[in-house]
């Protein structure tokens, strides 16, 4: 049992996880508390370990509720051209991550529509939330653009995007 009072399954070793049938992957995907299935604030501890490992190697592992299922599907089908980078994974890993992303993708009103190029940074809800941020702030070397959530949302990697904890670096 974790700190939220929910039972969570122990992560599977990668070799065993890649051999799981789709039905077992779906069961694992839905084992997480339903409250996180449609949230931009899924804590890192609730993330699929292989998703966290593979995606956070290059950028923050964004909570799956930040994009609709169609966006995640496009992204996972195009990992060989992932925003200018080849982020290819073996087919079993792609299947495992895809099933989990589909199960936890955003469906609430703000996320229903896929943003241009399936980019979180171009989603209407993110632009609304950051409308008061001066464009010059995004260009600061300490920030580097809107994709670097961790620059200002110091606990974003823990799924915490609370406005009270925003710290804009110089």
Image (cartoon, rainbow, N blue to C red):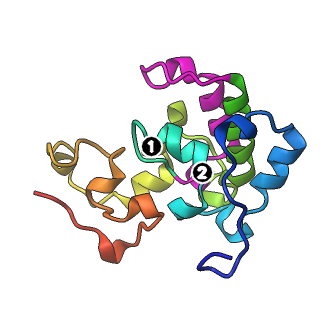
Name the residue that disc number 1 marks.
56
CB of mark 2 within 8 Å of CB of mark 1? no
Is the residue 42 above or below the residue 117 in the image? below
Q: Residues within 10 Å of mark 2 (few under 14, many from 20)?
A: many
Q: Residues within 10 Å of mark 1 (few under 14, many from 20)?
A: few
Q: Residue lying farthest left? A: 170
Position of the C terminus by quadrant: bottom left
Name the residue that disc number 2 marks.
64
The answer for how far apart the CA atoms under marks 2 and 1 are is 13 Å
Q: Is residue 89 magenta?
A: yes
Is the residue 164 above or below the residue 28 in the image? below
Residue 39 found in image quarter: bottom right
Q: Is residue 31 magenta?
A: no
Is the residue 1 above or below the residue 146 in the image? below
Name the residue at 86% across, 37% down.
21
The tag on residue 108 is none
Whether residue 70 is visible to the viewer of this picture, yes or no, is: no
- Between residue 62 and residue 58, name the one nearer to us: 58
Q: Is 82 placed left or right of 154 in the picture?
A: right
Residue 65 found in image quarter: bottom right
Label 2 vs label 1, nearer the camera: 1
- Whole-percent x, y for residue 103 in the image: 75, 51
Whether residue 106 is visible to the viewer of this picture, yes or no, is: yes
- Whole-percent x, y for residue 91 in the image: 70, 23
Helix, strand or loop at label 1? It is: loop
- Whole-percent x, y for residue 56 in the image: 45, 43
Q: Residue lying farthest right? A: 23
Position of the N terminus by quadrant: bottom right
Q: Earlier in the sequence, mark 2 or mark 1?
A: 1
- Between residue 114 and residue 163, name the one nearer to us: 163
| Magenta stretch in the rendered image | 63-90
């Amino acid at each position: 049992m974790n700190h939220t009072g929910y039972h969570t399954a122990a992560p599977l070793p990668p070799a065993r996880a890649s051999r799981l049938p789709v039905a077992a992957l779906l069961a694992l995907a839905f084992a997480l508390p339903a409250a996180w299935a449609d949230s931009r604030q899924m804590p890192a501890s609730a993330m699929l370990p292989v998703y966290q490992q593979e995606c956070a190697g290059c950028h923050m592992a964004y909570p799956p509720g930040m994009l609709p299922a169609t966006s995640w599907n496009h992204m996972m089908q195009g990992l060989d051209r992932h925003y200018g980078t080849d982020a290819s994974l073996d087919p079993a890993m792609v299947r495992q991550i895809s099933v989990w992303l589909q199960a936890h993708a955003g469906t609430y009103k703000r996320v229903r529509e896929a943003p241009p190029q399936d980019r979180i940074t171009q989603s209407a809800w993110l632009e609304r939330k950051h409308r008061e941020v001066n464009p010059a702030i995004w260009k600061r070397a300490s920030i580097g653009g809107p994709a670097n959530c961790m620059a200002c949302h110091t606990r974003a990697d823990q799924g915490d995007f609370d406005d009270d904890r925003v710290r804009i670096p110089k």
